[in-house]
Amino acid sequence: MSASQIILEDFHSKALENNPLNDPATRRVPVYLPPDYDPAKTYPSVYLLAAFAARGLKLLNDDLWEEDIQARLDRLIGSGEVRPMIVVMPDASTRYGGSQYLNSSATGNYEDSLLELVAYIDAKYPTIDDPLSRAVMGHSSGGYGALRMGMRHPEIFGLVAAHAPDLYFEMVYQKDFPHFLRFFEKAGEEGYSQLLADPGAALSKGASFYALAVAAMASCYSPNPASPWGFDLPMDTYTGEPIPQIWQRWQVHDPIHMAIAHEAELRQLKLLFLDCGTYDEENLLYGARILSSRLKSLEIPHIYQEFEGGHRNTQFRYDTSFKVISDSFSAP
């Protein structure tokens, strides 16, 4: 048996050209080709979306106690638990950390870019160009992106697996607001602008990661080209009170609410898999339970699982999702 391969594609996205943050339009995208890969055959494909402050390359990181994604897939395919597949690991990172895989006037058109990437991969590799043989999956913000893409583009991604996705924004994001407010109280508008201009430098000097995370999410959920920063903050920086009309703009992007608006699209999915750890430190368990309950009330088929664990060090859950995806693909 020949070994699996990781091909590093330099993918140029027209959708990201001239983006507001001047982030690169050309991205390094790892592509996993299974053992005994044969370009004369066709393969189902999976798009594995990275979490916030990460990109596809991070999935290949060596870890003393954990398999990287290549080793995991080699084991699953070699044991026959998972069928051979092509796995693509996009880069949707921004200067602020992440794009949430959506289009925004403050960051760029990352949803469009991901769709471009699908067309690029289908043209270059022997993938099965059929939504029933194409999955999108991810963890945390990557899980959010997977849910969002499935809700909006079931004609592209017919299978979705979301591990601990960003859900129930009141629980997952508002807990970061006090951290942001303390930073803003000390740094002021000038210090905040410096953080946004060069996050790496600012973080190395002790700036709050949570303040940056709030900016990243605001740039995705409440962009405003007329604002000095390109987005509106969802709270009053003096009193800390949420600003209802801005917070409502965030909630529109919460999959708990999106599920109602995209009920018809969710019904088109062949697979919708959702899980979360019972001790998730980001409070995502409760959003997962709400979404599962909402899907049940809508009679939308899905698989929901809870497992012993938190938000981090849960790569072992990929064993479950890759198996469920593999079993759900159209027959070879």
Image: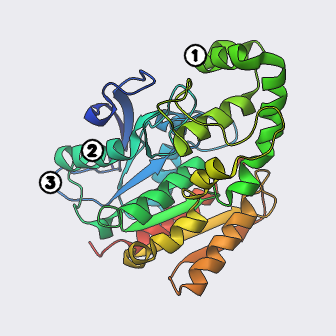
Identify the residue shown where x is 52% and y is 45%: 100
Q: Residue at x 62, y 47 (%)?
A: 246
Q: Residue at x 78, y 17 (%)?
A: 187
* Residue placed under numbered mark 3 in the picture: 40
Q: Is residue 17 above or below residue 136?
A: above
Residue 2, located in which quarter of the rendered image? top left
Residue 128 x, y percent position in the rendering: 23, 61
How far across and how far down the image is residue 213, in percent? 66, 35
Question: Which residue is identified by label 1?
Answer: 197
Q: State which mark lies toward you, 1 or 2.
A: 1
Element at label 3: loop
| 317 relative to 301 in the view: left or right | right
How far apart marks 3 and 1 lie (CA) works out to 48 Å
Question: Mark 3 vs mark 1: which is more N-terminal?
Answer: 3
Crowd class of label 1 (few under 14; some 14 to 19; many from 20; radius 10 Å): some
Which callout, 2 or 3, points at the residue further toward the start of the chain?
Answer: 3
The residue beneath circle 2 is 116
Q: Secondary structure at mark 2?
A: helix
Q: Amino acid at mark 1?
A: Ala
> Earlier along the polypeptide chain: callout 1 or callout 2?
2
Image location of residue 204, percent across then percent down: 72, 14
Task: Tell me the CA gap for discs 1 and 2.
Answer: 28 Å
